[in-house]
Image (cartoon, rainbow, N blue to C red):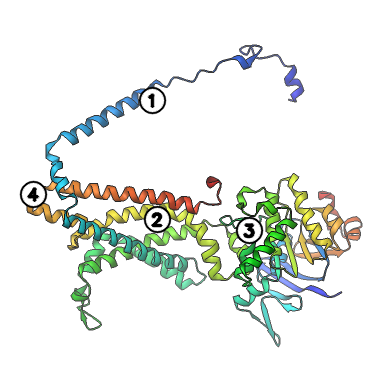
Amino acid sequence: MTVMVDIRSVHKSFGSLEVLKGIDLAVRTGEVTVILGPSGSGKSTLLRTINHLEKVDGGAISVDGALIGYRRAGDRLYELPEREVLRQRTRIGFVFQNFNLFPHLTVLDNIIEAPVSALKRPRKEAVDTARRLLDRVGLAEKADAYPRQLSGGQQQRVAIARALALEPKLLLFDEPTSALDPELVGEVLDVIKDLAHQGTTMIVVTHEIGFAREVADTVVFMDDGRIVEQGPPGDVLDNPRHDRTRAFLSKVL
Amino acid sequence: MSSDTLAKAPAAPDIPEGADSLRIVPQRRLGQWIAAVAVLVLLGLAANSVLRNDAFQWDVVADYFTSRSVLRGLWLTLWLTAVVMVLGFALGTLLAAARLSANPVLRAVSWGYVWLFRSIPILVQLLLWFNIGALYPQILGVKTVDLLGPVTVAVIGLTLHEAAYAAEVVRGGILSVDRGQVEAAQALGLSRWRRWWRIVLPQAMRSIVPPAGNMLIGTLKGTSIVSVIAVQDLLYSVQLVYHRTYEVIPLLMVATVWYTVVTSVLSVGQYYVERYYARGSEAAR
């Protein structure tokens, strides 16, 4: 199996606070990686470096064989112009904790915005794709609604459809259910599970241990800017080797 | 206390069995009625004194209301307001973008501009521009006096003043847009230009329109200050008439009524613009 995401010794600091202290991680094509860890462990920051929403201070990340955000010449990494970075991002879908739908645009316009303006797809084609995706997340009848007219769970499903509209090679989820009322978590997880079963490569930062157990090929446990351990969910969740993993799991399970 | 113990607790003494048959009598607000009547009486007295006072000379007001020189002055006031608003907000938007940019030099220059032009009273500024010929007798080989006539000075002075305030209004609007909106647009690969025009600005407009409407109305009336440099706006036009006829009050009433009419039209316009930019928000449902 080929490697989709290759993260090598990534470091990142905010001021004097080092939030990523040398991360190495490989995600294979078609697999689901779930990242667990306490707040402040750096898991969201790591996810955001993968599509260059955060620049790294050291190390390198490649997605589908291409360096993200930089061009290498010899032993130097030259930062890419924004246009190139934006093009790279269209291959990587990102779903935010707070959905971040555009409130002044209808659901349909939210979904076709990037295909039409960033990928220059014909509008009609983009609309057809958007309607198919809305049907897939169970919201076919909400195309003309505005985001604020939807429940949190519905908004997040629209956000997933919006990410899928770019036909990304990789999907990144940053705590996709953390902002939802408990009874709405299931409908969003169902959509993500459905994508996982269809072989979409994805990295999911979450606190949903049950989801990790059911869907993940690999579970990564992070603490204090480092990966403490990683492996199949059966190993990491049921037989953790490190005390910190055990301590974390005992609190959330 | 659990609901179980509540149900067993005896009813409070004032609440009889069958509480749903009790009738609720609203409080009688006598003070409100007295205040309302008093205000109406005062309003009536004021209206009476205005309409019955012959010194207002309402017939003279009617004569000049649509006279040629007054309408020409009104037209100048209207287009001057429009030009100053458009140029002022164009410059103000650039200043706001500079202030929010990552470039420290641009940020400092923008801050300095706003500081300077908010510090100088508009009247002082107009007089300075009007007398700029004393500093620079010639600009690019042309006599400054010929280049900068009163109307040009009015446009320049009012625009520079307006831009300083517009910059703050636009900046406030942009800051009111959630940071996540830009991140989502970046994550979707939208270009800088597209993020600005399609995502940030339309959302910023919700916060920009109310103060901008205020500024528009303020500018409309504020243009009357150009009468000090002999620009024939609405105010100066009526002044020209009353310097000749001494009918000061009725001619000031002509200007007053016109300013009120235009302001009313603008207020109605603002309502519809606000409604447009509120689409997608809870209030517009």
Label 1 belongs to which residue?
A: B32
Task: Report the disc number at residue B246.
Answer: 4
Q: How crowded is mark 4: few (under 14 residues within 10 Å), some or many (20 or more)?
A: few
Q: Residues within 10 Å of mark 1 (few under 14, many from 20)?
A: few
Please tell me whether residue B21 is drawn above or below residue B202 in the rendered image: above
- Residue A226: in sight, yes or no? yes
Nearest to viewer (mark 4 / mark 1): 4
How far is the residue under mark 2 from the one under mark 1? 35 Å
Percent across and percent down for residue A82 are 60, 75
Label 3 belongs to which residue?
A: A108
Q: Which comes sooner in the sequence, label 4 or label 1? A: 1
Indicate the chain on which mark 2 is placed: B
Q: On the same chain: label 4 and label 3?
A: no
Percent across and percent down for residue A211 are 82, 54
Amino acid beneath label 4: Tyr
Q: Which comes sooner in the sequence, label 2 or label 1? A: 1
Quadrant placement of the N terminus of chain B: top right
How far is the residue under mark 3 from the one under mark 1? 51 Å
Task: Report the disc number at residue B212.
Answer: 2
Q: On the same chain: label 2 and label 3?
A: no
Percent across and percent down for residue A238 are 91, 55
Indicate the chain on which mark 4 is placed: B
Q: Which comes sooner in the sequence, label 2 or label 4? A: 2
